[in-house]
Structures are given as C-alpha cells and as structure tokens.
Amino acid sequence: MYALTGKSVIVTGGAAGIGKAIVCAVAARGAAAVIADRDLAAARALEGELRAHGLKAFAVGADVSDSAGVAALMEETVRLCGRIDVVVNNAGILGDAEILDITDEAWRRMMSVDLDGVFYCCRESVRQMKRQGGGKIINIASAGGKLGFPYAGVHYCAAKGAVMALTRQLALQLGPEKIYVNCVAPGTTQTEMVRHRSEETIQYICSHIPLGRMGSPMDTAAAVVLLAGDSAGFITGETIDVNGGLYMA
C-alpha cells in the first residue's frame, strides 16, 4: 500500500534527525532518495549506508536559503533520476528565545532557512512538476506554527505558521496541475536540535502530551510516507499533526 518503487524523492536536511529518518523510510520502500544537505560529508555517509543495503540514494550538497543552489539541486535531481516525484521540505533551524533577545540577524536567519528555503524549493520543484505532469510537495512545519509552544521563539513559530499557510494556498493553486501540496507538523521530537534543552524542560513538555513522550523521527517519517504514496491520492492542502495529542491537552 505504501510502496514508493520507481519514485524519486528529494529530502532537504536529509542527513540527520527527522530528515534522515524520512530518507531511510522512503528508500526502504523503493524510492530513489536524494539526500540534500549542507553537510555533504554526512549526506555521503548516509548514501553509502543505504547503498550497502541495496537501496537507491544520492547525496547532493544544498543550502536551501540560496535560491540558485536550490535550482541547482532540482537540476541535479533530474539529471540523476530523470524526474522529481516528491519533494520533502524538511531543512530547518530551531530558535528558543524571548522576543527581546531576537536580533535582526537572528530573525532574518530563521526566515531565510525555515520559510524562504521552503518557498525556493516549492517554486523550483513546481517548474519541473508542471513539465512532467504532476508531483507531490510535503512541507515539514511544527506544532509551534499552530500553538503557543513553550520555549520556542516567536521567529520560529512565525516561520512554521507561514509554511502551513503557504501549503494551503499552493495546494489550491496547483490542484488542477496534479501537484499535491501537504504539510506534516511534528511536536517536540527526539533529535539533536532539542538535546540542548534541560531535563526539566523536557519533562515539562512531555507532561503536556497525552501520550507522555516526545516523538521519534520515524513518527514523522511515517506520515511523510503516507502522503508521498499513491494511497494519498485525494489529500491535498492538509496538515497532518504528529504530536502525541498535544492539541488536546
């Protein structure tokens, strides 16, 4: 039901954390996984691991905050795979700060990666998807984009909320082109990005999650696999919340 055999899937920020879990999940289901990451050495290491297991993977260096670099990523994917079936816009940075501690530079940096990067990847992938007659875009947002979220900076939450709005409007515009656009919004997830938080903070966050734990990267990857496959043929413009019931708390 969830096979991705023959599909090419770009995952930005694919060398670590949630992105790495997504790469492994789509490759295990038969896709050619393009691991797009600023850390090319880490991307190549993951490429080697996957190929050692007989899976299809390609490491490509990419900085999503650079529009020219994003265009080059799309061109390289077409060269390697012949087409772009799915783009997972996962690359992002986290910011925990009070508003008075957020400098102009910190605000611009957050937007350049977490929002501009998504826009650039959507725009460039749409060029190719229109030529080939369709495709799927899956944006990774955050529970913080919908909900006042403890310890997350307003710049982070603002960017993720904008990604959800971008997803809905783009899905509306591109439906007739057979281009699906959806979003996955994880709650707090066990990755390197949250390991700087204290044990007290983690316990506080988990106490507000009905399932009583943080998410795992594979929890988000499972939602991406669903949206990437043919089973989600009537889903577009949606945000799937993967947060252990946080919104009910």
Image (spheres, grey):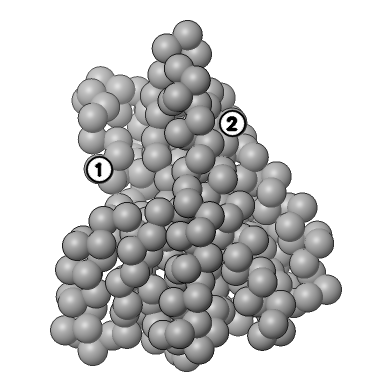
Number of other residues with Cα within 10 Å of mark 1, as a class: few under 14, some 14 to 19, many 20 or more: few
Can you identify the residue that label 2 sits on?
158
User: Of all residues shown, which one is farthest toward the top?
Assistant: 100
| Residue at 32%, 55% in the rendered image | 38
Q: Amino acid at mark 1?
A: Glu
Mark 1 secondary-structure assignment: helix
Pinpoint residue 162: horizontal percent, then vertical percent: 64, 40
Q: Is residue 11 left or right of residue 60?
A: right
Pinpoint residue 118: horizontal percent, then vertical percent: 56, 52
User: On screen, 26 above or below 206?
Assistant: below
User: On screen, 103 above or below 222?
Assistant: above
Mark 2 secondary-structure assignment: helix
The quadrant holding residue 101 is top left
Front in this rendered view, residue 143 or 44? 44
Mark 1 or mark 2: whose residue is earlier in sequence: 2
Residue 233 appears in the rendering? no
Pinpoint residue 67: horizontal percent, then vertical percent: 53, 55
Q: Amino acid at mark 2?
A: Ala
Q: Which mark is residue 192?
A: 1
Front in this rendered view, residue 140 or 80? 80
Residue 129 appears in the rendering? yes
Q: Is residue 233 left or right of residue 17?
A: right
The quadrant holding residue 127 is bottom right
Give how far apart the Cα atoms at labels 1 and 2 are.
Answer: 22 Å
Pinpoint residue 149: horizontal percent, then vertical percent: 50, 26
* Labels in figure, total: 2
| Residue at 45%, 33% in the rendered image | 109
